[in-house]
Amino acid sequence: MTLRLLCKDPESPDNNSPTLYYDDERGTYLLQSWKISDPQRLASISVPDHETVVEFPERLLKLFPDATSIPQ
């Protein structure tokens, strides 16, 4: 498995998150970001036990690469 770093939030106070990776082997994206733990927010969506929800700032979207630009 090879994870490729695609983008990182340049305004992150500790320069660690949010971060977007691409998994070459699975052809999937991994988003490291802030865990949502507010019960009221989580109650408004259905999240199965095997999934989680993360939050990231709008400014990160402009850094996401186009899917066609990821080498296969």
Image: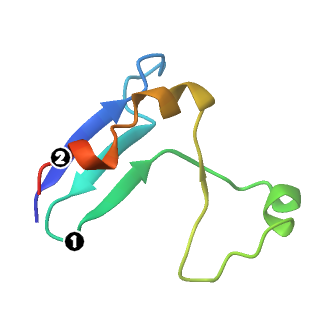
Q: Are marks 2 and 1 in contact (CB under 8 Å)?
A: no
Identity of the amino acid at label 1? Arg
What residue do we see at 67% from left, 53% from top?
36
Q: Is residue 53 left or right of residue 31?
A: right
Disc 1 target residue: 26
Q: Which residue was labeled with disc 2?
A: 4
Seen in the picture, residue 21 relative to 19 is either above or below; the reply is: below
Q: Position of residue 26 (x, y in %)?
A: 22, 71
Q: Residue 35 or 67: which is nearer the viewer?
A: 67
Q: Specify the quadrant that holds the C terminus.
A: bottom left
**71 or 39, nearer to the observer:** 71
x, y percentage for residue 64?
Answer: 40, 36
Q: Amino acid at mark 2?
A: Arg
Q: Position of residue 40 (x, y in %)?
A: 89, 59
Q: Which residue is found at the position 22% from the left and 42% from the top?
A: 69
Quick check: 32 left or right of 41?
A: left
Q: Helix, strand or loop at disc 2?
A: strand
Q: Name the residue at 17% across, 46% down.
A: 4
Circle 1: element type: loop
